[in-house]
Image (cartoon, coloured by chain):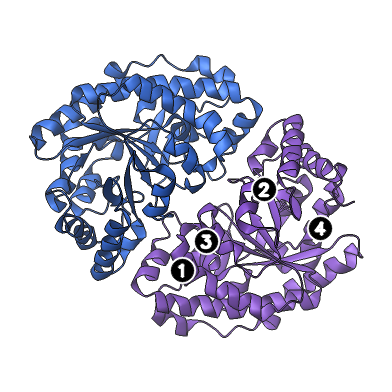
Chain colours: A purple, B blue
Amino acid sequence: MMRQAGRFLPEYRAILERTDFLTVCHTPELATEVTLQPVRRLGVDAAILFADILLPLETLGVGLDFGKGVGPRIERPVRRREDLSGLSAPAVDRDLGYVFDAVRSIRRELDGQVPLIGFAGTPWTVAAYLVEGGTSKYHDHLLGWSYRDPQGLARLLEHLADLTVDYLLGQVEAGAQAIQLFDSWGGLLDLERWRALALPPVVRILEGLGNRVPTIFYVRGGAHLLTGLAELPVDVLSVDWRQPLSQVREVVGTGKVLQGNLDPGALLGTPDEVRARTRALLEDGRGGGHIANLGHGILPMTPVANAQAFVDTVQGSGGRR
Amino acid sequence: MMRQAGRFLPEYRAILERTDFLTVCHTPELATEVTLQPVRRLGVDAAILFADILLPLETLGVGLDFGKGVGPRIERPVRRREDLSGLSAPAVDRDLGYVFDAVRSIRRELDGQVPLIGFAGTPWTVAAYLVEGGTSKYHDHLLGWSYRDPQGLARLLEHLADLTVDYLLGQVEAGAQAIQLFDSWGGLLDLERWRALALPPVVRILEGLGNRVPTIFYVRGGAHLLTGLAELPVDVLSVDWRQPLSQVREVVGTGKVLQGNLDPGALLGTPDEVRARTRALLEDGRGGGHIANLGHGILPMTPVANAQAFVDTVQGSGGRR
């Protein structure tokens, strides 16, 4: 369920009441605990590392912070070619070793029960925060740069790609058994600009990773990018809830497993409605490999009983376990 | 350029420095002034009424306010079937007469120079604020209601449709020469749910309007809704920047004029880049009726020279005027 470790679980909220978000990320025992919470509570078929797509920025010296309730903030945003020289050389073992420690600790605790999925944001999506200095309504700094000096922006994206390779190889070496890339902001771009700007650094990451573990690519609002997504050298394409999987399959073919794509909003309905929608999803996913999942992260206000109804319906209908 | 009267113009910012947003809307002389600013400054081919899609809510007694910098707030959101009985009966002449006065005043000032476009939000999009109580990150109240009690939500949307008919007929009677409907949040829904929830109140509005004036329907992030949009009984379909017009045309055919769809972010590039992108847009729009426009509202930080380069390139290349 994407960010399945999260605010919808009371045991997670209990931890976040006494510890801030970044401290949970930085403390392997706490990251382990919240990663395991949904596995214990719901019996999902995989664990997802508790982390944030912006953590790798900690090794670039840009001043990452998560203010309570205001989302991420970056003290020294990178907004033009000249800013690139101010970035520190990435040193993931030194600055992000706590993530790899968490991966090792989670694998120990899981003890083979279910696999562990690691992840990172795509360079375009990470840049959507790094260039803006945090969450943004208009993404005007990023878009402006992309039109004024696409080559300069490409250099930042390449830099982020190299950092991401180091970061993900660190996760894999520590024990992550699959890697998911989140392209949450790729849908801002039309296909031509997505191919020109967002795709090359993703290909660079996938080449850097080699074929060590299965790869999953998630895009939000990417219905107009499907022909480009179909060509991505990944094992699994994870799509949002806006298009039926059967329609996605027509473009993508059976060469890729599809992941998704129940509307997270559907988990705010009645448990009966959740079960009916989940059964319809499983039906829609036939015709190729399918990992039943939500179409985006589970919403913080989701009733736990509904998350459970989703998981139980998938597992009860011939899914794994 | 959608919300062309706006923050990118220094003469608009000068007015907003001494008067709050809602007061400008409420005062026909000020609404007239800011509506005319982009016509005078840029020589665009149509004026767009200065108003807000949430203004009609003022006749429902829900407590609409625009706090400085925080966006719209609705004091008494409508979140369930039981809340419907608390809504006042719409009385648009009593509560929204200031909009119709502004329309009359703008028409007088324009004196036939360019036509005036009136507008409203679609019921689904207005509900995205009315149900949430303002702007929302997750739209969880709206989505939850839509899954728990779609019939109850449909009653709210029908109520909003009837209000919108009164509101738009008032604009047309006062002199609006075309009407644009903004479905900014329709793209949240998959096609099946868009047809079930968002479409019926839109059809109700279009029927209520009759064929008095040309109608334009704008949707944001609607690439996955195209087959549904193609069936809408409107004259003009306005799409965002994510899909080339030639691709949209393949689905929609030549029976509708297409409006759009330059990325508003492109106006943050150099003027040369703006001209090149605009020429490419005009090329892409061939093969049917085309109203050159942006794919979403002009961004507040757009340099005026770039807005001018866009308008001049359109008009210099055989466009009207």
Foreground disc of the pair 3, 1: 3
- Mark 4 burial class by Cα count in 10 Å: few <14, some 14-19, many 20+: some
Above/below status of B203 relative to A163 = above
- Mark 3 burial class by Cα count in 10 Å: few <14, some 14-19, many 20+: many
Marks 3/4: CA–CA distance: 26 Å
Q: Secondary structure at mark 2?
A: strand
Residue type, numbered disc 3? Gly
Foreground disc of the pair 1, 4: 4
**Which mark sits nearer the N-terminus, 3 or 2?**
3
Above/below status of B271 relative to A284 = below
Q: Position of residue A219 (x, y in %)?
A: 59, 58
Q: In this figure, which residue is indicated by the disc labeled 1?
A: A131
Chain for disc number 2? A
Front one among B229 and A100: B229
Front one among A74 and B163: B163
Marks 4 and 2: same chain? yes
Residue A40 is labelled as none
Q: Secondary structure at mark 4?
A: loop
Marks 3 and 1: same chain? yes
**Which mark sits nearer the N-terminus, 4 or 2?**
4
**Which mark sits nearer the N-terminus, 3 or 1?**
1
Query: Does residue A75 appear in this view?
Result: no
Left or right placement of residue B236 versus residue A163 in this view: left
Residue A46 is labelled as 4
Q: Secondary structure at mark 1?
A: loop
Q: In this figure, which residue is indicated by the disc labeled 2?
A: A261
**Which mark sits nearer the N-terminus, 1 or 4?**
4
Q: Secondary structure at mark 3?
A: helix
Q: Residue at x 23, y 62 (%)?
A: B306
Marks 1/4: CA–CA distance: 33 Å
Marks 1 and 4: same chain? yes
